[in-house]
Every structure is written in C-alpha cells, then in structure tokens.
Amino acid sequence: MNASARDNTRRALRRRRRALSAQSRNLAARAVCRRLNSTQLLRPGLRVGMYLAVNGELDTAPLISLARRHGCQVFVPVIRSHRTSSMWFVRLGDALHVNRFGTPEPASGHGMRISPRFLDLVIVPIVAFGTSGERLGSGAGYYDRAFAYLHARRAWHKPLLVGVAYEWQRMVDLAAEPWDVPLAAVITDGGIQAFMPSILRSRGR
C-alpha cells in the first residue's frame, strides 16, 4: 500500500469512525474493557499509558477506570512538539484541557513526566490494524517516534504496546512500513489477537 493509498484509507476509516452512534461507541468500549479485564495485563503498580479518545476513537474512559481499579498508575501522552512529532507521558489527574493541537491532556501539563521507555504497558490508538500486528496510525508519527527504540529490542523491552480498536478496523492487506512499531496484541469488541507468543499468559502468570 503506497502513501496515497494509506492516506485514502485513513480518511475513509476516520469518516466511518466519526459516524458511529454514541451507543455503538459505548458498547464497543465496554466490550474491549471486559476483554482487557479477562487478561493478566493490568497489575498493581504498573505504569500504563492511555490515550484520551477524540474523533470517534475507541473510548478509553472505561479502560482508565479499570486500570486504576487494578492499582495501576495511568499516564497520558502530551505533545512536546508538533514539528518533530515528539511527546512525553504525564500522570493523569482529574483536570483536562484541549491543547493547541486539538487533543485533550492534563490541564497543568506539569505533572509527573516520564520517558515512554519507563512505561510498562501502553494502550495505543488505531486507525487500522493488520493480521500480524501492523498498525495504521494517524500519520503524524508520534507513537512510532516515541517507541522507535523497540525495533532493536536488545536490552530494553518496555513497554508492551497493545492496540484497542473496533473489530471492523481489521485489514487483511495492511502492509507494515519500515518505521512502524509492531503491536504485541490488539483488543477489539470482537476478540483479542496476540502477535507475540504466549503474551497474554506470560505477562501475569
């Protein structure tokens, strides 16, 4: 899939995502939450990165509540620079505001900041995903740049990247680009697909 085809796919899937009814979004988010809760991925003390949903993305509010019930610390991405597509992660508090890029983030912006590599688990937003862990994102490159070091996986393996999406966002013909950081698993309202052997079992047992 060339760059033009990927952009066309993004636009079409975003339109479909925005057109979902509130009820459909709510049902899908709760189904994903139940499936995540059925795994051993959330454990007390873990540092978990979560995106804050916009424009019809799968709602992470139930997932954030679930992670906190499991005793996890929740961090959300904050854009450092739109020009360089860089971001850090900040401890999630109660107050949010919409930043100049149109995405919600902690109101103060000065909470506990950590490098992406010190997170244990990151719930990643998806525009589309493939059958082997390929991810089509927004195209801005924030996540690919933040976790580019995971391509080597020689001395540092954190965090585990798990995508959440609607089942209809699955694509059988999605090809990975060289800079794409593959997902360990994807959880949808239709099921869980793990791309790393025994990932769901070995993380908590």
Image (tube, helix red, strand yellow):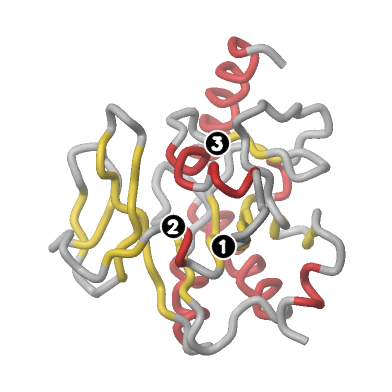
Dot 1 or dot 3: first in sequence order is: 3
What residue is shown with label 1? 159
The secondary structure type at the circle numbered 2 is: helix
| Residue 201 locus on image (x, y percent) | 81, 77
Q: Quadrant of the C terminus?
A: bottom right
Dot 1 or dot 2: first in sequence order is: 2
The amino acid on which the numbered mark 2 sits, given as a three-letter code, is: Pro
What residue is shown with label 2? 116
| Residue 89 locus on image (x, y percent) | 35, 59
Taking the spot 33% from the left edge, 53% from the top edge, the residue there is 88
The amino acid on which the numbered mark 3 sits, given as a three-letter code, is: Gly
Q: Nearer the viewer, residue 166 or 157?
A: 157
Looking at the image, residue 201 lies above or below residue 52: below
Of circles 1 and 3, the one toward us is 1
Dot 3 or dot 2: first in sequence order is: 2
| Residue 5 locus on image (x, y percent) | 64, 13
Q: CA distance from mark 3 to mark 2?
A: 17 Å
Q: Residues within 10 Å of mark 1 (few under 14, many from 20)?
A: many
Side of 184 relative to 101 (left or right): right
| Residue 85 locus on image (x, y percent) | 36, 34
What residue is shown with label 3? 137
Looking at the image, residue 7 lies above or below residue 64: above
For residue 39, what is the image quadrant?
Answer: bottom right
Q: What label sits on residue 150 in the rendered view? A: none
